[in-house]
Image (cartoon, rainbow, N blue to C red):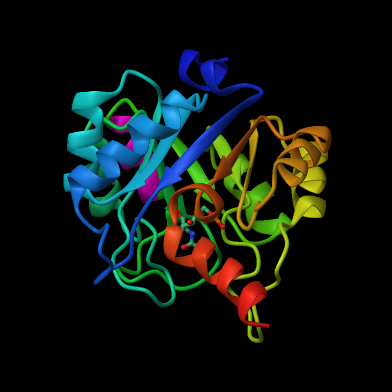
Amino acid sequence: MNEVLDRLRGRLVVSCQAYPGEPLRDPDSMRRMALAALHGGAAGIRAQGLDDLRLIRESVDVPIIGLWKDGAEGVYITPTADHAAAVAGTGADVVAFDATDRPRPDGRPIEDTIAAIHDAGRLAMADVSTWDEGVRAAELGVDAVGTTLSGYTGAGPKPTGPDLDLVEGLVAAVSVPVIAEGRIHTPRQAAEAMGRGAHAVVVGTAITHPTTITSWFADAVNG
Ligand SMILES: CC(=O)N[C@H](C=O)[C@@H](O)[C@H](O)[C@H](O)COP(=O)(O)O
């Protein structure tokens, strides 16, 4: 197995992201968040945006899963091959991209994104929402599949918990590492994801998004 993925085997990756308009939305805040996560035992960092990725790359030696969120609807996680090439250029070891079966803004197939990532010498992580998408991405040659987008592509409210059945289903079906990601909010859920066969677990909100964490407590206190 590739050395980068080997370093993440059985380990925690912390996603350090802030959203437009938020107080922590600046690259140095995310760099500090990444360093704090490493102090706590994270083995890798997931981050978004070219400026954040460049700055974090200067500060950490651990594997970085990079992405570029462009927009907030439809396909927005590294939506095109050009976005993927730019993320690769920041020094991120792994480039995560939307590998759902939805129409892509540049109209090009995901094969082009995978090729752009591999041409740059990086690993490709397919962020999927379904088993079919994960199997297809693996067939197309990605290096890892993540459950990142499960619960975000359909109509209706988003689920509250992680999609661990999808983790387990993909583990049984693909030969590349399956990374559990999305709404993992407790250490118990993270451990369960590993028990279902995940190669690594990515946690974002529950570690690095104080506004959401505060709202959990405020709702509980306010009744
Ligand atoms: C759906 C989407 O846009 N997911 C993004 C992907 O990078 C991030 O907003 C998430 O924080 C990340 O996937 C980690 O998940 P969680 O924050 O639930 O632990």
Q: Main secondary structure of the magenta part?
A: helix
Up/down of 88 relative to 181, above or below: above
Residue positioned 35% across, 61% down in the render: 79
Image position of 172 (left or right of 117):
right
- Relative image position of residue 53 (x, y in whole percent): 25, 40
Image position of 208 (left or right of 69):
right
**Is residue 42 at all visible to an observer of this figure?**
yes
- Relative image position of residue 59 (x, y in whole percent): 23, 25
On the rendered image, what quadrant is the N terminus found in?
A: top right
Front residue (pair 97, 161): 161
Residue positioned 59% across, 46% down in the render: 146
Magenta stretch? Answer: 112-119
Front residue (pair 116, 38): 38
Residue positioned 69% across, 60% down in the render: 130
On the rendered image, what quadrant is the C terminus found in?
A: bottom right
**Is residue 89 at all visible to an observer of this figure?**
no
Instruction: Let me know if residue 133 is in the magenta part.
Output: no
